[in-house]
Image (cartoon, coloured by chain):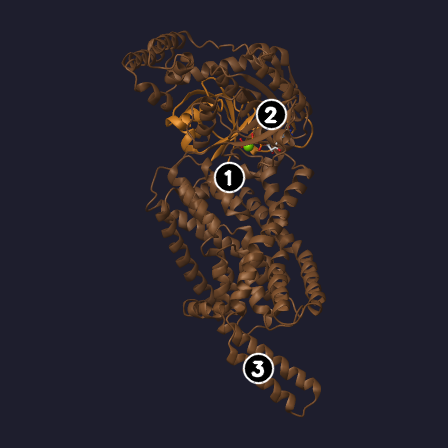
Amino acid sequence: MKLSELKAGDRAEVTSVAAEPAVRRRLMDLGLVRGTELKVLRFAPLGDPIEVNCNGMLLTMRRNEAEGITVHILAGDEGHQHGWPGFRRRHRFGKRA
Amino acid sequence: MSQHKTITVALAGNPNAGKSSLFNALTGAHQRVGNFPGVTIEKHEGYLDYRGYRITVVDLPGTYSLTPYSPEEIVTRRFIIDEKPDVVVNVVEGTNLERNLMLTVQLMEMEVDLLVALNMMDEVEEKGISIDLDQLERLFGSHIVPISARNRKGLDELLDHIVSVSEGRIEIRKNKITFSAEVEKAIDKIAVLLAHERELDAAANHRWLAIKLLENDREVYTQVQKYPVWVKIELALQEAITECGILHSTDPEALITEDRHAFVRGAMQECVRLPKAARASASDYIDAVVLNRVLGLPVFFLVVWAIFQLTFTLGKPLMEALAYAFGLLSETVAPHLPAGMVRSIFVDGVISGVGSVVVFLPNIVLLFMGLSFLEASGYMARAAFVIDKVMHRFGLHGKSFIPMITGFGCSIPAIMATRTLKSRSDRLATIMTIPFMSCGAKLPVYVLLAGAFFPPAMAANVMFGIYLLGIMIGLWTAWLLKSTVLKSDSEPFVMELPPYRWPTLTSVVFQARMKAVMYLKKAGTLILGAVIVIWAASNFPRSSALDAELVQEKAKIEATAVAPELKAEQLQTLEARIEASQLEYSLAGRSGKLLEPLIRPLGFDWRIGISLVTGLAAKEVVVSTLGTIFSIGHAAGETSLSQILRSDPGFSKATALSLMVFVLLYIPCVASVGVMKKEVGAWKPVLLYSVYVLAVAWIASFITYRLALLWM
Ligand SMILES: Nc1nc2c(ncn2[C@@H]2O[C@H](COP(=O)(O)OP(=O)(O)OP(=O)(O)O)[C@@H](O)[C@H]2O)c(=O)[nH]1
Ligand SMILES: [Mg+2]
């Protein structure tokens, strides 16, 4: 599966990185290598670029670049789809979980 | 101080790690600091004396890797390799160790004398991250000094370490990390081949060269390719590629990075304890709003709008106070000066010319404070993220946005900041948009004209509209270029978002003070000079016929038998009329007249023509020229420049709008044209571009003027 196909809130593990040499290099130096876990945080207002959290770092890239990154999806993290960071640790009705 | 022993220290590290902050803290310099990656693009040197040493500190552009692709990464690597600094201080962001240590590993491979400055210790402590420094030192073989560059903590300790390393009292163990077996095999093979090549420098680090060859490093390739041994090396490389493909289903370059990463991750696991329940931070909540799919763009426009609103509304009372003070000054000074030439040069020239520019100091300072808040807070990179798609439509890049915003301050650093863009065509297109990003020097023109011809509530919006127009034409220019002469594949967008940081009060105050001093300096030198020249050009030559006429007419009025008040009034109108004719007769008047047919369709008379020409030196001069020329024939301190303009028959709302548009668009100042030439590399495109800009300015002003005449 490609990173660009994930939804906001999905977590995944990188299986390979393909891109033109300079970009690939940059992505790898930023920590996107085989085995790295990442989480898709959100898409920009117009749907592109995308923001992922990778080892605690906030990384943004265009869909175009995300297409070259193959991942394998880990268990989804549904509460975070809403993009509000603290959402999951609460109940829907505002009570603490 | 020749008896000083010298040490050269290079500051290397990831972008946004705090290298420039450290550089400033050590040397007392004022290099630009900002909370987004890619602030520094050139190396800068500074000095300090410490314990009998003269230490040269070199601030380098940030890099993620030592296999360089972008120009500023090349600067960094070349410096470390070619200049061989005595000590390399690797500035590391303590809150983002994993990524930062990837570069540390690469520096280790180069076997330089390495010291690690673990920066942002304040944030590390605040977040409750604990780091086992001793173990980390053991793994990396270099000393690690915890510091906080921003709070100037740990600096002496760092300097002590620097001195000790250079004296050889601290041993850098130069640990080697071990790569996968296949890679190691290939490295050994190539290193041996290189060692046997007699023409190659025996002192070269063969292991490092071998690693770089396996990483497809273009520079090292071309360096080694010219030796006979290359044939054998190429075979070895080919073999390594095949082996890695079979055994690891990847290429040597990726494998090497993975191995480095594994090493760093191992070190992290051993040495770094993150706080247990990592709670969502304030940063996450802010991002949830600021980067929100619905709110992201409105927030972006709101932020930019707020800055201009602030610049105008908050600046207005201060500006008026200053204007009042200058009026008072010329009123008090005038009677003490001998009438005629001397009084005119001081009152009409210096005070109203320079004064009319200095008055805008509060606006300028506020604008720059707003911009530096954007830079320091961490919003800049986020704005690039939000706006990337829009920019992309016009053939630009999200990152183009950062130089463009910088351009609202001054075009020169903005043009230089385009160096963070990798693709040349993107860079050129971005450079060409920058003159349309209205710079701080044009602000006085808008404040003056918008303030004079529009009610206060509207004035800020008129200004915002002018800025928007600039942005739109800039984007359109980029699109035009990218779809004709600068066609290319779009550059990838990969960028890290830094954590939000509060700008420190001291840095904000300092920035403001520096901008104020720079502005006043400019007013006292360049603008003062221009004012004197303009004064002279608008007073000489004088027509003796007109002088004679004045004497004659005066005598006539004196001779008539009317009330004294009426007489005084008649005298005044007469003097003003003669002065105006003298101005037309002067050098400035004649050249303005020459220009007039060209600019008449835009609603400008020859007096405005003169200010546009002088404005080429610096845009503030437009205002000071208007100040000098329009005050001729008015009594000292009689009225403010905006009142004079309002009452002048040659000036209407439509003229004001048209003039604002023209000043927004027409050729940028001489200094920025020079920088543009330097960055583009040739005169021809820059000159062509200037013609284009002038044409655009003319057409846009023409349209503005005609529409304004119709509707107002
Ligand atoms: N909290 C904290 N922030 C710091 C410290 N040192 C630097 N910063 C902040 O980190 C950001 C980046 O600092 P710079 O000095 O511009 O970083 P740089 O390494 O020169 O960045 P580039 O020039 O882009 O490579 C700024 O917002 C600084 O205020 C520190 O010790 N503590
Ligand atoms: Mg810097």
Q: Amino acid at mark 2?
A: Arg
Front-most of A16 and A90?
Answer: A16
The percent coordinates of residue B676 (x first, y second) are: 43, 45
The crowd level at tag 2 (other Cα within 10 Å; few <14, some 14-19, many 20+) is some
Location of residue B230 (image quadrant)? top left
At numbered mark 3, what does the secondary structure look like: helix, strand or loop? helix
Q: Are marks 3 and 2 in contact (CB under 8 Å)?
A: no
The percent coordinates of residue B82 (x first, y second) are: 44, 23
Mark 3 or 2 closer to N-term? Answer: 2
Q: In the displayed structure, would residue B670 be above or below residue A49? A: below
The crowd level at tag 3 (other Cα within 10 Å; few <14, some 14-19, many 20+) is some
The percent coordinates of residue B380 (x first, y second) are: 55, 39
Callouts 1 and 3 in the same chain = yes
Q: Which residue is mark 2?
A: B54
Q: Which residue is mark 1?
A: B384
Quadrant for ligand 1 reads: top right
Please name the color used to draw chain A. orange
Judge: label 2 CB < 8 Å from ligand 2: no
Q: Amino acid at mark 3?
A: Leu
Mark 1 or 2 closer to N-term? Answer: 2
Q: Which residue is mark 3?
A: B550
At numbered mark 1, what does the secondary structure look like: helix, strand or loop? helix
Mark 1 or 3 closer to N-term? Answer: 1
Badge 2 sits on which subunit? B
Please name the color used to draw chain B. brown
Front-most of B258 and B74?
Answer: B74
